[in-house]
Amino acid sequence: MTEPLLPTYFISHGGGPWPYMTGDRRRNYDRLEQSLIDMRAELHDRPRAVLVISGHWEERGLAVSSSPNPGMVYDYYGFPDYLYHIRYGAPGSPELAARVRHLLGTAGIGARLDPDRGFDHGTFSLMKPLYPEEEMPIVQLSLDAGLDPAFHLAVGRALAPLRREGVLIIGSGLSYHNLPAMRGTSGYEPSRHFDDWLQQTLVLASAQEREQRLIAWEQAPSARAAHPREDHLIPLMVTVGAASEEPAAVTYHQTDFIGGLTVSSFRFGNPPISAEL
């Protein structure tokens, strides 16, 4: 039986280790958490593994995590001590890591296996609500430090066959990522302007225009105010490249994140049809 064609997702992953937080700060993430629960439901438990492209991992060239038992990367600052002792215990998949490397190599894109890389918060902050059982195999793919959008679109195209192999491809970043501005109100309007452009680009534009606009993303309204450095935007390119001809939909949208920021997540392609239908 042919595997269903899985959609790809770009997820605005929130801040730090939020699923493990307690108290009032945790409430900032209620709608994001619900969107991830809804995402799990629309996938009908069809994925057999997940490939995450995290905005928190950059290398010169591409690297693929290949440990069967990944550790943790506590890549955040200023949180209570207990948040530096949490553990998300899902397995890795050396087999999937090798498959990712092979697909990239076939497309002329070099990648190395990294047996030491653990789960950063761009990965475990999503996986904790998505797969709290901690049983889903997860592999991470780094960004190339050049952060070239056209290159990462090509990476996505090379990885597209994984969607027929039961592998869920997730780009983990943020639609708005300007940390200094997040501490006040100056990010409210730029985040809204850039999000409006993202909606037009991803949901309304044709497939060809979508890629052209993403390659030229710096021309978008408030582009550099929204992304002084584009590390949290580039995972989007991989997920679009892997589903380049398919429609997009908004899966999470919030206009009052951390007070008044506008942030969104997107799906590319349609959810698999439930076997019960």
Image: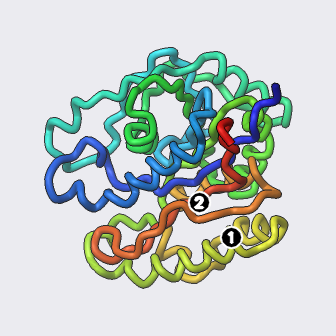
Badge 1 is on which residue?
203
Left/right placement of residue 270 relative to residue 57 reads right
Disc 2: CA contacts within 10 A as few (<14), some (14-19) or many (>=20): many
Please tell me which residue lies in front, 37 or 243.
37
Label 2 SS:
strand
Disc 1: CA contacts within 10 A as few (<14), some (14-19) or many (>=20): some
Residue 32 image position (x, y, % from top left) = 40, 57
Residue 162 image position (x, y, % from top left) = 74, 34
Q: Do the residues labelled 1 and 2 touch (CB within 8 Å)?
A: yes
Locate the C terminus and report the quarter of the image it occupies.
top right
Which residue does the image show at 34% across and 69% down from the upper left?
257
Please tell me which residue lies in front, 94 or 180.
94
Q: Which mark is residue 157?
A: none
Question: In this rendering, is residue 169 above or below 227?
Answer: above
Residue 273 in view in this figure: yes
Badge 2 is on which residue?
266
Which residue does the image show at 39% across and 42% down from the upper left?
129
Residue 194 image position (x, y, % from top left) = 54, 77
Which residue does the image show at 38% across and 43% down from the upper left?
125
Residue 236 image position (x, y, % from top left) = 62, 56
Label 1 SS:
helix
Q: Which residue type carries mark 2? A: Phe
